[in-house]
Amino acid sequence: MSEDVEHRVALVTGATSGIGLAIAKRLAAAGLTVAVNGLETAEEAQAIVHEIGGAGGRAEYFPGDLADDAQSHGLARAVIDRFGALDVLVNNAGIQKVAAVEELAPQDWRRIVAVSLDSAYHTIRAALPAMKRKGWGRIINVASAHGLRASPYKSAYVATKHGVVGLTRTVALEVAETGITVNAICPGYVWTPLVAAQVADQARVHKMSEEEVIRTVMLAPQPTKRFVQPEEIAEMAFYLTGEMARSITGATISIDGGWTAK
Ligand code: NAD
């Protein structure tokens, strides 16, 4: 079913920073109503939500800790209750922890899996009935190059992102005839506040200049030797919401500077 973009409603989880913020802005600029989720209080998120809404469309804040099953399910339900629809679901929130597997605390494992993988299961479950009623929907899961490849000391993150890819493929098959597409974007290293904050620390630990640490440590697996920008991910997410992307489903779309070509 075709419908004006202005009547579409999107939920972007983890939309107060980095990749999620760029996706929220891109969808708002296209005229969508965007439900912005994050961990901040409504007051803390006010300026960010104003910035997203300023790009166009309409933006409203929906706080919620996605480490909590009930809050994840409740988030998607709250968006449907508020706007009467949830057409574009972007599961973006994610965290990670770098540690050898035997040193990774069970609570860190649990939280990493819960925030990205469990929450995607819950939001998808809550969103699908509304999408099916319309005969149209877009589910975009922000996975990672680590959904396709492993790196040491990231067991929970790599397992989670592989799980997100498996969930994406399975749900895509289940809803293939309903007008709903389900895809995973798999970024390599993206220049976000999270990554930027690591540069100085890494340079200090490795006793290298910041340029050297970026090139030889952080971007070692990324053949282009440059960070992906959040706007590049956002543009792909926006493309996937369009009619010309209706045959793209169950896909893993790598935006990783050639990382997974190896
Ligand atoms: P970021 O830290 O800049 O943003 C993460 C967002 O998730 C924030 O808005 C934060 O509030 C939210 N969040 C964290 N825990 C949450 C929780 N419990 N409940 C609700 N919201 C929560 O990170 P980013 O770099 O923009 O990463 C976004 C996504 O992209 C993640 O899933 C990450 O794994 C993935 N990714 C990032 C990179 C990269 O290099 N930056 C590469 C591949 C994949």
Image (cartoon, rainbow, N blue to C red):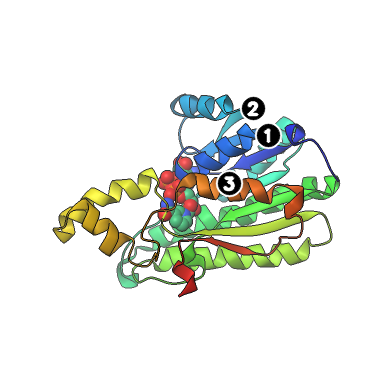
Q: Three-letter amino acid code at disc 2?
A: Arg
Q: Residue at x 71, y 61 (%)?
A: 249
Q: Quadrant of residue 167?
A: bottom right
Q: Is mark 1 within 8 Å of ligand 1?
A: no
| Distance Cα–Cα, label 1 vs label 3 | 14 Å
In depth, the one of 172 and 199 nearer the eye is 199
The answer to whether any part of residue 94 appears in the image is no
Q: Residue at x 61, y 68 (%)?
A: 166
- In percent of width and height, residue 109 lies at 42, 62
Q: Determine whether label 1 and label 3 are within 8 Å by CB.
A: no
Which of these two is toward me, 93 or 208? 208
Which residue is label 1 attached to?
32
Q: Which residue is mark 3?
A: 235
Which comes sooner in the sequence, label 3 or label 2?
2
- SS category of the residue bearing label 1: loop
Mark 3 vs mark 2: give the one in front.
3
Instruction: Using residue 193 as the reference point, say whether residue 19 is left or right of it.
Output: right
| SS assignment at label 3 | helix
Q: Give the alpha-carbon distance from disc 1 to disc 2, as whole Å.
A: 7 Å
Amino acid on which the number 3 mark rests in the picture: Glu
Q: Which residue is mark 2?
A: 58
From this view, report whether residue 60 is shown above or below residue 133.
above
